[in-house]
Image (cartoon, rainbow, N blue to C red):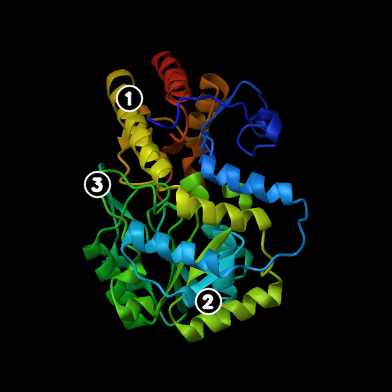
Amino acid sequence: MKYDFDQIIDRKSTHSAKWSYLKKIYGDEEVLPMWVADMDFKSPNEVIKAMEERVRHGIFGYTGIPKSFYKSVSNWVKKRHGWNIDEEWIVFTPGVVTGLNLAVLSFSKKGDKIVLQPPIYPPFYKVIEKNGRKVLNNPLKFNGIRYIMDIDDLEKNIDEDTKILFLCSPHNPVGRVWDEEELKRLEKVCLEKEILVVSDEIHGDIIYSGNKHIPIASISDDMAMNTITLMAPSKTFNIAGLHTSVAIIPNEEIRKKYKETIDLIGANTTNIFGLVGLEAAYNYGEEWLDELLIYLEGNLKFLMDYIEKNIPEIKVVRPEGTFLIWLDFRELELSDEEIKDLMINKAKIGLNHGPTFGIGGSGFQRLNIGCPRSILEEGLSRIKNTINNL
């Protein structure tokens, strides 16, 4: 490999949300953090060099968005996902969660319902509830191996107060990469019921062999006109701290209203290094990403083999995308608090606690494999030794 993903880099002195606050989060500096969804790999050299060059200029005043920014996004989306988008559809946002908030503020009112498909990324709940909207749960169905959408339940429960559906695609935490048939079934319901789809596709570049990410807005012209697609290089190139993302909005009327809300709340200011980082990543980072995907696939195989051999009590929900692994601890017959205590205080490993993902999260934990294999092995060893001593 051209890139060294086995390199261990100390992040504790960098105010890393993942590594620098272990005592505050867990009460113990010895906990190994494998929770928050950023990776422990250096970003591509091309990204680092582009930002170093910008730093050398020495002036960091207010900055506009160059045409090259939009071009790099459209080229990337076409190349990696086969979706031809007009550059005018692209709207800058300072983060995908901000993009979700903007959609809620623009296209719903207090008391309206917004559909979620739990277990799901916890900030989705906060976005809805903090804005005075109501969560309408449409839980995914789990057959012990794979999760699927429950479209019948969705059709049955949406009503005239239901305005938006948040789609997580690929799905965090269960790792599903939705196929065309599933997306078309969802499209049919949302178009018939006039439900706006806001699709978080931030993990869309992290896809494993045999799967293909399909932006839901790309499946038909009608769906494109009914979708706000949120994308970012954050997860792909490990640049989440740059807080730079985009909303892709083909519908001119929806885009106009969305941009008005951006201006209203002052979310239209850019990050110099975010602009530079995004362009460099999308223009020059493809080779790095291709090698990353090979490495992550190796991590996934290592994890699945290790758990099957050494910790058979834990079941792995095999992801089709993302570097996040949904682990099923239910066979241990422990309460959620007992599982949490076991991981943090006995195994000394920090995972994401299943119940925070809502309905269907009980008995599960989320683990991040976006790290050197030696760190992954250490984390799994800690879990094995703890469970074997129960």
Packing grade of label 3 (10 A; few <14, some 14-19, many >=20) is: few
Give the mark, 2 or 1, whose residue is nearer the N terminus.
2
Q: Quadrant of the C terminus?
A: top left
> Percent x, y for residue 277?
57, 52
Disc sitting over residue 307 in the figure:
1
Q: Amino acid at mark 1?
A: Ile
Task: Spot the residue most to the bottom.
Answer: 253
Residue 307 quadrant: top left
Q: Is 116 rendered above or below residue 324?
A: below
For residue 384, above or below residue 4: above
The kind of residue tagged 2 is: Asp
Regarding mark 2 in the picture, which secondary structure is present there?
Answer: loop
Q: Earlier in the sequence, mark 3 or mark 2?
A: 2
How packed mark 1 is, by other alpha carbons closer than 10 Å (few <14, some 14-19, many 20 or more), is some
In terms of image quadrants, where is residue 244?
Answer: bottom right
Circle 2 packing at 10 Å, graded few (<14), some (14-19), many (20+), is some
- List the residue tagged with mark 3: 143
N-term mark: 1 or 3:
3
* Residue 47 image position (x, y, % from top left): 55, 46
**Residue placed under numbered mark 2 in the picture:** 112
The image shows residue 18 at horizontal and vertical percentages of: 60, 36
Look at the picture and state if 361 lies above or below 92.
above
Q: Tell me which residue sits at (59%, 24%) in the image.
A: 31
Task: Please tell me which residue is depicted at 69% across the width and 34% down the height of the picture.
Answer: 14
Asked whether residue 197 is in view, the answer is yes
Mark 2 or mark 1: which is in front? 1
Q: Is residue 344 left or right of residue 202?
A: right
Quick one: quadrant of the N terminus?
top left
Q: Is residue 79 left or right of residue 145?
A: right
Three-letter amino acid code at the position of disc 3: Asn
